[in-house]
Image (cartoon, rainbow, N blue to C red):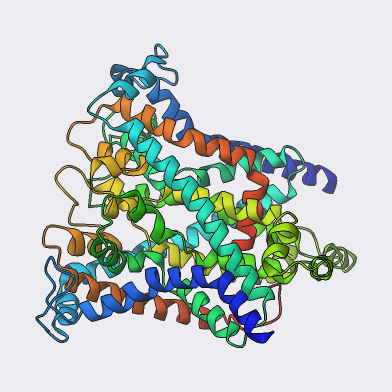
Amino acid sequence: MRRHRTLWFWVFVGPFACGLALFTYVPLLWSVGLSFFDAHNTVTPTHFTGLDNYAAMLRDAAFRDSLKTFLLFTAFIVPVTYGFSLALALMVNRVRWARAFFRSVFFLPAACSYVVAALIWKMSIFNGVRFGLANTVLGWFGGDPVAWLSTTDPPWYWLVIVTVRLWLQAGFYMILFLAGLQRIDPALYEAAAVDGARPGWTVLRHITLPQLRGTSVAVLLLLVVNAFQAFDEFYNLLSDARGYPPYARPPLVYLYYTALGQGQNLGLGSAGAVILALVIAVVTVAQARWLRLGRTDGDG
Amino acid sequence: MDDALVRAGRALRLALLAALALLFLVPFYLLVRNGLADERDITSPEWTFFPADVRWGNVRELFQDPSVPFARSLLNSALIAVATTLGTLLLASLAGYGLARIPYRHANKVFYGILGTLLVPAAVTFVPSFVLVSSLGWISTLRGLIVPTLFSAFACFVFRQYFLGFPRELEDAAQVDGLGYWRTYWRVVVPNSRPVFAAVGTIVFLGAWNSFLWPLVIGQDQSAWTVQVALSSFTTAQVVRLHELFVAAAVSILPLLLVFLCFQRWIVAGVERSGID
């Protein structure tokens, strides 16, 4: 009977587990192996180079810049998206009229791909010439047109990059916050009202926000991991027929050009991927510590 | 006094929400406006809210332009999205059920092995996965675009959590009737779990249709381009035909908006599951 069950377990789980092993664990291990070899244009290299790839990667100013770009991007996008989607959720949750409509409208951009969103931003809103929407609006107030994506001082391109992601993601996190708000026990608000707490800021600070703790932790973790994986909007906003500009390269864009660009230096690319995997692991663990993920109070 | 204040606050909130909603809809409007305008209207220095004339002919032009493999890339995206969705649902739900319901000594180890891959962001593994797929000779094939993405640890996790809470009485009754695990699963569990399949399925479908990095890396030949790769290569090309670009982008999100509006309830359920639990 037990052997019979084991057999059935593997009939159900086997295909998935084998596929996952083949397409996640095998490439990972292979890549760790490759990172110790000189692997130009080949996946079965013979020239062992030890830690040279890692040293080269860490010495490369462009790679270090890409980590800085990630930090800067995270510093913008995480608090802005967090605050904005929380505010949206609080407002949509309390509005009495056309609530489903508002929820749908804010969530709708989540169906849009980063490619399409970047296209609208780059070719229409922030296209940098006079007929662009942003410059038209600026013109109404007497401002001069701004070349949004190619101005590095001040770095206006950040405005473009951050607003694309904000537009696309805010609704998704709003849905998470709305779900969290729905789970708060109404009795808590009644008790607060009996105690004389005025609705508004006090209730928000002492009841709503503490009750949303679990949701907040999940949202922050997702925001950071997603910022780390940013590729689509950077690539589609900034690269053109001549290639990618020397600024605002997040880690994945850098890795894309290193590993799959002209040199196809897979050894170096693999070393970069390993370093990035370690960075994201450290960031995630540090964040979980900082947010005290194990805490059991609040919702979950 | 207080009452008036509350009412004023409510009106203010509604006005703010309405303004933000309009702002959120502007990009969609621009897509349609520019897609149905002609080149002159898009690049006119005097920006007008409505184009001078609405040219539905742009859509026909897009599909007839031989230099742009747009119809082919739409077909590729549709095939990939449907195959990925069905494959993921089948594999992940079977695995989730096995992990939740079939007792096995090492089930926990297998589960943590699966869960562990969630800690490795998929984007970090794109270089190694590219290496594997290229050594299988799957570059620029639909196989290469579909098969490696079928094994979603996230979907498996959602299914396992769901099946843990599935009413056991239903399964017990089936076992009394002499059905084994396999037939119990197909005849009792699946028909009673449609909401979770719909939730996971729509999320996987949206993700597959919109994904960009993997199709960009694997679909190198024009024949294997997805809609996103095609749009991206038009955007970054030397010569851009704006109205064609916008109408292509509008056509590319049309199927998604339909899926989105019809299945919104399930998508919301899926998103709620993805954040917490």
B198 with respect to B4 (left or right): left
Q: Nearer the viewer, residue A52 or A267?
A: A267
If the image is split into quadrants, where does the N terminus of chain A sit? bottom right
Image quadrant where residue B121 sits: bottom left
Residue A19 picture location, percent across and down? 44, 68
For the point 31% across and 66% down, the residue is B129
Image quadrant where residue A292 sits: bottom right
For the point 64% across and 44% down, the residue is B264
Asked whether residue B38 appears in the rendered view, the answer is yes
Asked whether residue A205 appears in the rendered view, the answer is no
Position of residue A25 relative to residue B150, above or below, is below
Image quadrant where residue A115 sits: top left
Residue placed furthest toward the top: B53
Position of residue A137 relative to residue A9, above or below, is above
Residue A166 picture location, percent across and down? 47, 51
Residue placed furthest toward the right: A194
Q: Nearer the viewer, residue B151 or A116?
A: B151
Q: Nearer the viewer, residue B245 or A59?
A: B245
For the point 41% across and 62% down, the residue is A227
If the image is split into quadrants, where does the C terminus of chain A sit? bottom right
Residue A61 picture location, percent across and down? 16, 71
Total labels drawn = 0
Residue A23 picture location, percent across and down? 38, 68
